[in-house]
Image: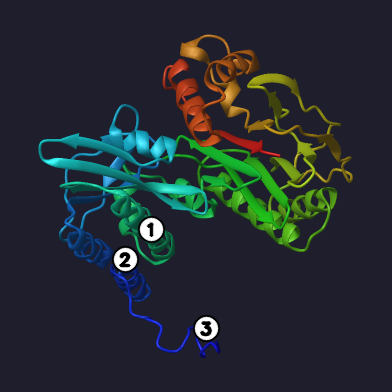
Amino acid sequence: MTLGRHGKRPGQERSESFGEMLLGGLLDRSHTLPPDRLGPVLVGTLTRIEGRDIQILLQDYEQQRLVPLPGEGLKDGEALPIDGSEAGRCFLTSQSVEVRSAEGTRVHVPLLDGGDQAGVLAVTMNAVDDDDRRLLRRIAGILADALQTKNGYTDLFFRTRRGESMSVAAEIQWSLLPPLSMTMPRLSVAGVLEPAYDVAGDSFDYALNGDVLHLAMIDAMGHGLDAATMATVAIGAYRHARRTSVELSEIYLFMDRAIAEQFAPDHFVTAQMLRLDTDTGRLQWVNAGHPAPMLIRDHRVVRRLNSPTTLPVGFGGAQPQVSETVLEAGDRILCFTDGLIEEHENGQEQFGEDHLIDWVHRLDRADRGVRVVARDLSHTLRRARGEATTDDATLVLVEWHG
């Protein structure tokens, strides 16, 4: 039989199903929807499937709480702790969580965007079946995309996520960052910056270009705006060089020239640049003044990825030697700045790499993804230091799935 212009047989039904109408209506409106109207439109959509007490819960900058987004029709309330709440369990596991009570079923759905997670959609329903679950997952997907897109031209989500005043330097650094986590079929990436509201010189960046993951971590000397300014130049230079598809050693030289030309001779940025072939597991790296990354295999630190000495960026170092190894499926790489290990533990000696390794062994388990491990590792180390963070303390954890 001949098919029509749209691939349909003549007379075949093409009207919308209820689910298509519901999702299509939300998607059609999301493109031109002002950020502050996102909540009311979501409420209007979910009430059509008898949803109520609807909340959009966003992760705060310290990664400690889930904060309700204000909006017409949205349920307000106190922020929920990520640790110890059902919404937090949904956030940490990236899996829907249902809680039944006499009032109905409270459904928590992760807001996933490109493997990153902005927060949780929470809604109460009288009863939940598989059709409802499928619709809620897809509505949450559209909502997560809309939050990511509209975040670029509103302060609403930033204000919701901010738990206290933030320094100008920290504002600059957060504006530089890629999503804190990314999960793809072949790899996962997760990073944490502390102190969240006063970070200045630390930053990281990554990009997945085809089969290749590029990642850099930097630590600009000093504190405050001077450090944030240097970090901005360093990350900008890294991105520029990376996007021209040059080798790691040439990226280093480009960053070095950029810092040397813009700042005084005694100013520098320590840096670490990695390149991972996600098809083969081939890892290359250049280390310019950072602590050596750690290779975690079977959830144990098996060795430090030491490499030839390279001067920090800005000191005019020679073209560096690129180090190389081949990962096994499931291997994880932990990169961190010196603030994570040089802080004094409760006023005593420096925290040190041995304590860091000990906590990796306690927290890195087979049933925990890198986003959860990175967050717990950063928070646990801060508590072990007596909540002291006099320097920026940043870590990035990468897993190659194979």
Quadrant location of the C terminus in the rendered image: top right
The answer to which of marks 3 and 2 sits earlier in the sequence is: 3
> What is the quadrant of residue 85 in the picture?
top left
The amino acid marked with disc number 1 is Arg
The amino acid beneath tag 2 is Gly
Q: Are marks 3 and 1 in contact (CB under 8 Å)?
A: no
Give the class, few, some or many, for how many residues have Cα within 10 Å of label 2's Cα (few <14, many ≥20): some
The earlier-in-sequence mark between 1 and 2 is: 2
* Apparent side of residue 115 relative to residue 211 in the rendered image (left or right): left
| Residue pointed to by mark 1 | 138
Q: Which residue is mark 2?
A: 19
Which residue is depicted at the point 39% across and 63% down? 146
Is residue 62 visible from the viewing direction of this image? no
Name the image quarter holding the N terminus. bottom right
In this view, 357 is above or below 77: above
- Residue receiving disc 3: 7
Check the image and report above or below for 20 versus 110.
Answer: below
Look at the numbered disc 2 and give the secondary structure of its residue. Answer: helix
Q: Position of residue 370 (x, y in %)?
A: 55, 34
* Label 1 secondary element: helix
The image quadrant of residue 291 is top right
